[in-house]
Image (cartoon, grey):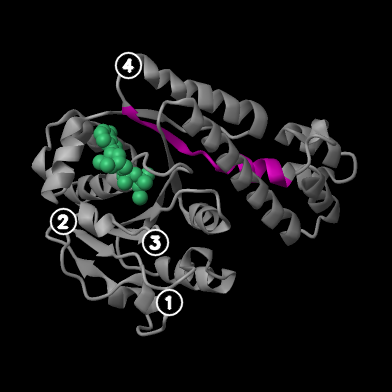
Amino acid sequence: MPAKIIAIVGPKGGIGKSTISSNLAISLSDLQRRVIAVDLDLGGANLHILLGVKNYKHTLDDFILKKVDNLSEILIDTDIKNLKLICGGANIPDIANMPFQQKMKIINHLLKLDCDTIILDLSAGSSFNVIDFLLIANQQILITSPESPSLIKVYGFIKSTVFRMLNFHFKNIDAQDGLEILSLAKDTDTNPNLKTINGIFSELIKTNEEAVKTAREIISKFKPHIVINMVYKNEETRAGNVISTMLKQYLNVSSSVITAIPADEMVRRALFKNKPMMLLYPGSPFSLAVKKLAELCI
Ligand SMILES: Nc1ncnc2c1ncn2[C@@H]1O[C@H](COP(=O)(O)OP(=O)(O)O)[C@@H](O)[C@H]1O
Ligand SMILES: [Mg+2]
């Protein structure tokens, strides 16, 4: 069976993507999954630190620079049973903007890795690189903090993702009318009726009913799991409902589940000790919440 790919995404930096990726990877390996964690935060790679890996021979750079032929050759062993790592590259200038072909090569090799679960720790922002890796995943975990600036970024990020999905789809089925409407929808001041996905579909259905039908099916398969991280008070979890209502109402995207992860000072303590949180403080509120998340990811 092919590995399940889980993408950890979130457009804002510093909201816990790598912290959750590393500890989720450990939890899943503890549940007897053979896991490979992949650091795709190109330019800001730090997953190895969070997994307590000090020495490593290879990074993604070696694959990109063709020093090795296969991604499997750059797998790094960790001290954790069932868990291997692909370290992010750091030394190729401008790697965060890698060409499409390069990205496709990495994607094809990811799909061939021999394991049960692949965790992709992605970078912040809404670039095509992030979105294209997100789109190959079987499950997307969308991390946000409860505050409005992060929620607004999440909305913009999912909008870009849906536009990218529709763009690929309309190109695939050669729906020029769909592509034109998507292009017009970039300027919502001039075309306020194209602000929502339903608005776009209402326009397109006039000329291409089939394209709307298939596009709806594609969007309905995209069901990100929303994680509200660094929750201080229970009521902050409501941010999850706010964002999921916005995604449904304006972008036709249903979120599968909403999970809250508490703010936990032990996370910082583990970071100072250069040891994985899940191993140092397995009973802390953060670790318990990530273990629950892992059970939902199986
Ligand atoms: N639930 C949490 N409680 C406390 N601190 C957290 C929590 N999640 C993340 N952090 C801290 O937030 C900072 C950013 O986390 P990181 O995982 O590097 O974010 P990202 O990968 O999204 O940029 C780190 O210092 C990390 O220790
Ligand atoms: Mg990170």
Give the Cα separation between the discs numbered 1 and 2.
24 Å
Q: Is residue 240 left or right of residue 14?
A: right
Kindly identify which residue carries mark 3. Answer: 2
Kindly identify which residue carries mark 4. Answer: 234
| Image quadrant assignment for residue 246 | top right
Badge 4 marks a residue whose secondary structure is: helix
- Whether ligand 2 has any atom under 8 Å from the Cβ at mark 1 is answered as no
Q: Tell whether position 228 is magenta.
A: yes
Q: Where is residue 49 in the image (x, y as percent from the top left)?
A: 21, 56
Count residues near mark 2 (Cα–Cα under 10 Å), then give few for <14, some for 14-19, many for 20+: some
Between 248 and 184, which is closer to the camera in this rendering? 184
Q: Position of residue 151 (x, y in %)?
A: 50, 30
Give the Cα separation between the discs numbered 4 and 1.
44 Å
Count residues near mark 3 (Cα–Cα under 10 Å), then give few for <14, some for 14-19, many for 20+: few
Badge 1 marks a residue whose secondary structure is: helix
Kindly identify which residue carries mark 2. Answer: 52
Between 199 and 173, which is closer to the camera in this rendering? 199
Q: Is residue 103 visible?
A: yes
Give the Cα separation between the discs numbered 3 and 1.
23 Å
Give the Cα separation between the discs numbered 4 and 2.
31 Å
Q: What residue type is labelled 4?
A: Asn
The magenta segment = 214-230
Kindly identify which residue carries mark 1. Answer: 64
Q: Which amino acid does label 1 sit on?
A: Ile
Give the Cα separation between the discs numbered 3 and 4.
38 Å
Count residues near mark 4 (Cα–Cα under 10 Å), then give few for <14, some for 14-19, many for 20+: few
Q: What residue type is labelled 2?
A: Gly
